[in-house]
């Protein structure tokens, strides 16, 4: 093995070392029940302690805490729950992004202005209220429809 073989071996060895993948920057928004400035400070202190958190913003009026950084939503949620406050992921989206913003599950009186709860769109085009077999009985394309009537 010559110099060229040794260099090739070393370059292959060094390139095969796996590099740690860096987590992508995420923004996690939480709805947290906070009553006073003391509660907001406590929540901010706890969420700042989450590994990978770069910035923490607490909005007492909207009952919202936003954590930005290399964090996972589950870890942030667990840390927020350690404050013994009522916590959930931020459930609101702008009302113009929801197909039917005023259905019973989406409309929330406590929501911030121009926001509604995020509700999955359960109604699809293939779903109908009547079964197709009943509509075929009385269809013009059905040659036996007259005999049924």
Image (tube, helix red, strand yellow):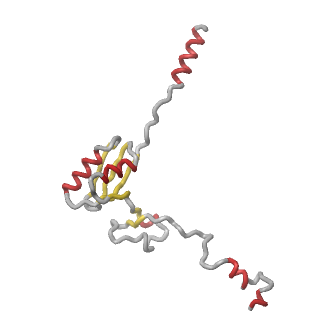
- x and y, in percent, of residue 79 in the image: 32, 49
Whole-percent x and y of residue 18? 50, 29
Could you say which is closer to the camera, residue 78 or residue 140? 78
- Residue 133 appears in which quarter of the rendering? bottom right
Quarter of the rendering containing residue 139: bottom right
Residue at the farthest bottom position: 149
- Asked if 24 appears above or below 99 in the picture, the reply is above
Q: Is residue 12 above or below residue 122?
A: above
Q: Give residue 104's position: percent from left, percent from top.
A: 43, 74
Residue drawn at (44%, 70%) of the image:
101
Is 31 positioned to the left or the right of 143 in the image? left
Quarter assignment of residue 48: top left
**Furthest-top residue in view?**
2
Relative vertical location of residue 122 with respect to residue 44 in this rendering, above or below: below
Q: Position of residue 30 (x, y in %)?
A: 34, 56
- Residue at 60% in and 7% down: 2
In the image, farthest residue toward the right: 143
Question: Position of 49 compared to 96: left or right?
Answer: left
Left or right of 139 on screen, residue 56: left
Q: Residue at x 22, y 51 (%)?
A: 42
């Amino acid at each position: 093995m010559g110099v060229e073989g040794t260099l090739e071996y070393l370059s292959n060895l060094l390139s095969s070392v796996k590099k740690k993948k860096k987590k992508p920057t995420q923004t996690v928004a939480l709805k947290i029940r906070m009553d006073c400035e003391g509660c907001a400070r406590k929540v901010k202190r706890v969420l700042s302690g989450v590994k990978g958190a770069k910035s923490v913003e607490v909005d007492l009026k909207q009952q919202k805490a936003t954590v930005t950084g290399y964090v996972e939503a589950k870890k942030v949620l667990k840390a927020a729950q350690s404050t013994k406050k009522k916590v959930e992921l931020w459930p609101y989206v702008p009302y113009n992004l929801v197909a039917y913003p005023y259905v019973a599950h989406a409309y929330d009186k406590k929501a911030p202005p121009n926001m509604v709860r995020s509700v999955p769109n359960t109604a699809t085009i293939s779903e109908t209220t009547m079964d197709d077999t009943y509509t075929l009985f009385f269809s013009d394309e059905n040659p036996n429809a007259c005999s049924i009537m």
